[in-house]
Image: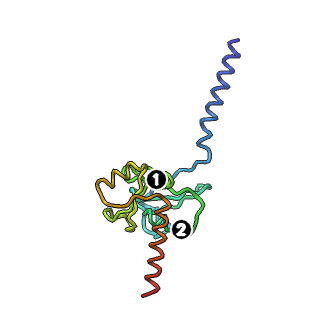
Amino acid sequence: MGKHILRNFFSLFLLVLLLASCGQVGTIMPEAIDEEVDICEACTMMVQDNQYSAQIVTPSGQISKFDDIGCMTMYINDNLPVGQPYVRDFYSREWVQVEDAAFVFTDEVETPMNYGFLAFSSHTNAEKFLAESSGEKMLWNQVKEKIKERSSHDENEHTHN
């Protein structure tokens, strides 16, 4: 009788371990930034390990790195890559999926390529920033639209000069 209980307990323990690991299978997370070698996929500038960097992680594990949220957004708008975009929380520098992030567009903080987008892991953090600074709170789709407008404006400006 004791062997039977021990075998059932062991089987249950293995099942719990297997189920716990299921959530980790197939999840590919962003890499650490290596300031010595990482180059922005969009503008070819060096990527700094700061709160402005961003990444796209493909299902196969290929990672594209960016020095500015605006560079990544422009790259996504132009190339439609398959993968999960990540940004860094302005305060903690933790990686956040873009769909889960709140963004602020501001001219009070100079981002690497002057796009002016900051990412936050929560709407509360974005509102905390806005309580101390000026700017406009946005969602990911609004950031993509703002970059499209900027790109369209820049193209029109170059063709009319």
For badge 1, the amino acid type reads Ala
Determine whether the residue tagged by mark 2 lies in a helix, strand or loop.
Answer: helix
Name the residue furthest left. Answer: 132
Answer with the quarter of the image where residue 25 lies: top right
- On screen, residue 40 versus residue 6, left or right, reads left
Callouts 2 and 1 close, C-beta under 8 Å: no
Q: Which mark is residue 77?
A: 2
Return the residue nearer the eye: 102 or 85: 102
For mark 1, what is the residue? 101
- Residue 57 at what x, y percent from top left? 55, 56
Task: Report the number of discs.
Answer: 2
Q: Residues within 10 Å of mark 1 (few under 14, many from 20)?
A: many
Q: Quadrant of the N terminus?
A: top right
C-alpha gap between disc 2 and disc 1: 18 Å
Q: Is residue 44 above or below residue 58?
A: below
Name the residue furthest bottom. Answer: 161
Q: Residue at x 65, y 26 (%)?
A: 12
Choose the circle earlier in sequence order: 2 or 1. Answer: 2
For badge 2, the amino acid type reads Asn
Q: Residue at x 68, y 12 (%)?
A: 2
Q: Residues within 10 Å of mark 2 (few under 14, many from 20)?
A: some
- Residue 28 at what x, y percent from top left? 57, 50
Name the residue furthest top. Answer: 1
Q: How is the image coloured?
A: rainbow
